[in-house]
Each structure stands twice: as C-alpha cells, then as structure tokens.
Amino acid sequence: MPWRKGQRLPPRVTLILVAATAVPLVALFWVSWRLLAQDRALEDQQIDQRVERAADIVAAALERAVAAAERRLAEGNRDWPDGAAVLTAQGEIVQVWPAGRAAYLPIAQKIPELPVEPFAAGEAIEFRERDFNRAAAIYRDLAGSTRPGLRAGALLRLARCLRGSEKPADALPVYTRLLDEDGWAFEGTPVSLVARQARCSLMETLNRADDLRNEAALLGSDLQRGRWSLTRAQAHLYAQDVARWGVEPSPAQPERELLAEGLSALWERLSLPGTAASGRGSLAVRPQASVVALWSRAGGRVSALVVTPRFVSAQWLAVIDPVLREQRVKLMLHDGTRGLPPGTVRRTDETGLPWTTVVAAGDPKAERGEYQARRRLLLLVFLILAALIVLAGTLTFRATSREFAAARLQSEFVAAVSHEFRTPLTSLRQFTDMLREHKNLSDERRALCYEAQARSASRLTRLVESLLDFGRMEGGARVYHFEPIDAAELARRVVEEFRAEAQSSDYQFRLTAQEPAAVEADAEALGRALWNLLDNAVKYSGASREIEVEVRRTGPEVMIAVRDRGLGIPAHERGLIFRKFQRGGDAVRLGIRGTGIGLTMVEHIVKAHRGRIEVRSEPGQGSAFALVLPVRR
Ligand code: ADP
C-alpha cells in the first residue's frame, strides 16, 4: 500500500494517535526522572541514617565489652590476657597482676632494709683498718646465722670484702647464696637483685663472656617475671645493664613499658583530688600512645585495670567485629574530640565509654554502587516500558493506517466498478435510443447498432461474472472443474474472442503457440485469467499497439505468456499488484479504467491449477506476465 498516493491518515486521527503515544511517554519520563532524582537525593540521607543507627549499636556493643571487663575486675580476677594489667593498692602497697606484666610500679615499694647494727664491728675493721681478711672472717661467722636479715647482710658484706681483697672468683658463690634471700632490701634495692647484678659484674671483670651472657639472661628473665617490685629508675637501670651485657630485650618489652607508663599515669590521676571513685578513661601516656583505664576505689582500696591498644583490638574490638560487619561500618576510637576523621561521632560524655567513637560507612563505594545498580535497574524498567509504549503506538498507527487504507481502497473499488458499468450501459442506451428514434435506419447501420449492443451486453456480463467470481474466490467458494485441455488452443480461442470483443482492432496480437500443450485445467477460469492479462496488456500499452501471446512447453511446465511494450511496472510496485483493490501509480494518475481485482483473480486461478504467475517488467519498456502450469501427463 505505501506506493499509493493519498494514503496518509487524516490529520485528526494522526494527532490522536501521536497524543495517545506521547502523553504516556512523557508521563513515564517525568515519573522516572522524578524517581531517579529522588533516589539520588535519598542516597546520602539513607547512608547517613544507617551509619547513625549503627553508631549507637556499636557503642552499645562496646559498652557491653567494657562492662564485662569491669565485672571481672570487681570479681578480683587477676588473670588477664596480654596487654592488660591489674593494679591493686592498699595505702602505699601497690601490686600489679599478672606479675611482671608492667615494666615497673608506679611508686617505690617498701621492703625491709637489712639491719646495720650487727655489722658495726666488722665494718670498722673493713673500712678503717682496711683488713678485708679479718672483716671477712667476722662476716662469714654471721652468714651462718639462722636469722634471715642477719644472714643476708653478712653474705652481702662478705662478698664485698672478697671483691675488695681481689678475690672476685670467691665472691661469686657468696652472691649465689644471697640470690635466695628475698624480702630484704639494701639501700632500697632487693638484695637478691643486688646479688644477681653483682654476679654479672664479676663475670665481666673475670672476662667470662659466656657466663656473663647467661647470668645477664637470668637477670633479664627475673626482671621480666616481675620478681622485684622496682621503680621506673631501677627498672631502666637494670634493663640497660642487661642490654649492655649482650642480652636482647624481650619482644614484649614495649608493651610492658606502655602498661607501666599507663599505671603510673593512672596512679597520678588517682592521687589528684576530685578524681571520681570509679571511672573509665583514656590516658595519653605518650604523644602517640594511650591506654585505657577502668578503676574503682572503696575504703582506701584501689583496683584498676589498664589495657593497651593491642588488648583493645584483640579483646574488645574482636568481640564487636561481627557487629561492625553486620552494620557494614568501620569504627575508629579516639582520645579526644580534635582531629577526628569524618563519620558519626559519639563523645565520651554521651556513651560513657573511655573513647570518642567515630563510625563511618564500611565501604561507601560499594554501598553507592548498590544504589547505582538499583537506579540502573529502575532506568532499564523505564526504558522497557517506554519501548513498549512506542511499540504499541507504532502498531496501533500501522493497524489504523491499514484499516483506513483498506476502507479507502474499498470505496475506490466501488467507484471504479460503478465507472466500469457506466461505460457499456451508456453505450447500450445510446444504441437503443438510436434504433428507437431512427426507424428508417439502413439494415447495415441497424446491424452495427445491434452488434454494438451485443458487445456492451457481453462486456456487462463479463463484468458481472468477474465480480461474482471474485466474490466466490474471496469467500473460498469458487469451484473449479478440471479437464484435459490444450493450452495453445485455449489461448488461440481467447485471443480471437478478445480481439473480436475488445474493440481493439488497431492492436496487433501475435500468437506463437507450441502445440500440443496439454494441461489439466478449468477452461473457463483459465480463459478468464488469460483474458485479464490481455485486458491489462491493452490498458497499459500506452502508445504501443503490439501484444504478443506465447504458449510454450518447457520441461514439465506449460507457459502462457502475454507481453506488451507499454508503460511497464516500477520495481517497488511489482510485489504489490496482486493484492486486491491495489492499482498502480500510473493507472491512477493516467485515469486508466480498472478495479484492482484483475491480477488478484489471475493469481487465485493459477494457484488453484497448482501453477504460478511470473512477472517481468521494465518501466517504459513493457511487461510480461506468464501463467506457468504443470504439464498434463
Ligand atoms: P486494474 O484493474 O487496476 O488493472 P489489476 O489487478 O489487473 O487491476 O492490476 C493491478 C495493477 O497492476 C494495475 O493497476 C497496474 O498498475 C498494474 N498492471 C497490471 N498489468 C500491467 C501491465 N501489463 N502493464 C503495466 N502495469 C500493469
């Protein structure tokens, strides 16, 4: 149909169809644009709200972990994992658990000093007379005493005399005995420590390098185990000695130092007036390091827990790790409120925790990615909907166009049929009038009139039969009576009849027939098909007057071809001319009579004969239509 002019839809219908497509399309675009924009605006807000909620959940989880530690502390538990130290204090007596966990104590501990009196005589000989042998003899006697203080003091002095009298090797076993004398101090230093340190110096003096290293290692391990309650100065001094004598400090040393510093900082804080009886706090002990302290004080008794960042992450943060993962956030703990990273901040006064907590989205990129994926999906749905609307619009447009075109074709058909009828009817009336009005017409003229009337009547009959036949074909009611016929003979007969009837005396019909061309056919139907082809050849011959008809047998087929040298058919029309009511552009433009059902019928008939129709045409050169039928065997 596209090749027919004037087939456009009426503007009003086109407008309605365009509006019916455009309005939902615009509405869809508007809704999707709004939804997408809203979603983007919500994205940040939703992430913030989620992180805000997570910050409270995380704070509560941390609170549970810290409170559990406080309960353990209150229960008097002294066995704590690495990175934690418990301090108990009653007056000036301070103890740290587990032993050796901290490098030193916050304050010096009072250990009983060795008695001095019993050694006055010995020391007079030792220092004034500088008689080390005699003094040593006195001390040796006293070293046999069962009184621990006396014994320890004597051993210490005996060893000193032996060193003074250039007998360092003899001093070594004396110091060994002294190693077991715990519980006494000499000028503030535990005597067993003095003994261990002295043994090291003697080994050094004696150049016994291996022994020195072993001895220093023993000193180091005792320091590590917390055998002695030392002050910071003492601890550092002996640690330096140990290092000087070639023993590597233990890897746990920095942690012990940190805990000791933390305990000292806490002790200082507790001694400040106005410090709460119980509390939690983060204590910055160095610019880059801080510890967390939990303490409670009742009736002069203090118990406190100090933990390092390592403990916090290994114990407390490990516990809340699942919470962080579930909430898809990351947590940062801070001492103060300055220099905080971006995120949701909960200060210590809000949470009661020892840190300011900062909670931020765990993987904001991935989270944004999720939102983006959701938006992309939404966009895809919108695009599919838009495509469906456009498709529905296009289909409706095409169906409506087709309906309109069919309606127009039908009305054109009716007009064309009326026109076809009018011509022979007018001719009939004219000749009838002539016969009636001119009574004295010569016999010759009268005969011409009758002939003309007969031609018009036969044309009308043919027209009516053709229409009835077309109706039957359309309704599927056309019945064919097949019989063996010779196509060449049929062609000759039809061409003769056509020439006689079609007032086409100036046309030259050239028939070439190869006989016999036996086919099984409905002679009347096949004749009509050939008649239609001849009729078209005449109608569309233009200025040409030559028409060829050829009947030929080619292999298993018989071909009946009609060739003209007329207008020809443009390529784009060739596939459409067999459709009912379809007329070519030239046919309409040049006002050539016709109804557009001729070729439809030809195709119907030839198909009923299990044959086909072939067209070859060149605009301006003419056309050839061939009915190709199976040969009769
Ligand atoms: P119509 O009544 O219009 O002739 P047909 O079905 O017989 O209807 O033919 C359909 C159209 O095919 C014609 O309108 C014409 O454009 C084209 N046509 C048919 N036969 C010829 C021919 N021999 N030469 C040129 N055009 C032809």
Image (cartoon, grey):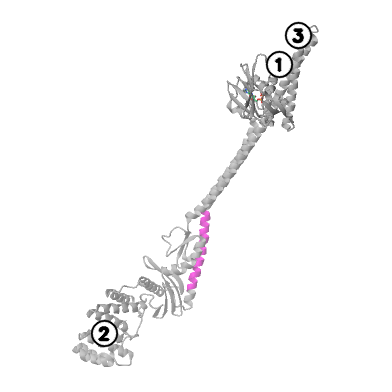
Q: Quadrant of the N terminus?
A: top right
Identify the residue position indicated by label 2 in the image.
172
Q: Does residue 382 appear in the picture of this structure?
A: yes
Instruction: Please name the residue shown 47% across and 54% down the image.
Output: 365
Q: Quadrant of residue 292?
A: bottom left
Front label number (3 vs 1): 1
Of labels 3 and 1, earlier in sequence is: 3
Q: Give the CA distance from mark 2 to mark 3.
A: 171 Å
The residue where tag 1 is placed is: 500
| Ligand 1 closer than 8 Å to label 1 CB | no
**In terms of image quarters, where does ligand 1 lie?**
top right
In the image, which residues are magenta? 44-69
Q: Residue shown at 78%/13% (left/top)?
A: 432
The reply to whether dot 1 and dot 2 touch (C-beta < 8 Å) is: no
SS of the residue at dot 2?
helix
Decide whether the magenta segment is chiefly helix, strand or loop. helix
Q: Which residue is mark 3?
A: 445
Image quarter (top left, top right, bottom left or bottom right) of the C terminus:
top right
- x and y percentages locating residue 117 in the rendered image: 28, 90
- Looking at the rendered structure, the kind of residue marked 1 is Ala
Element type where label 1 sits in the image:
helix
Q: Position of residue 449 (x, y in %)?
A: 76, 12
Give the residue type at disc 3.
Arg
User: Mark 1, residues whose alpha carbon is within 10 Å: few (<14), some, or many (≥20)?
Assistant: few
Question: Viewer-proximal residue, 515 or 483?
Answer: 515
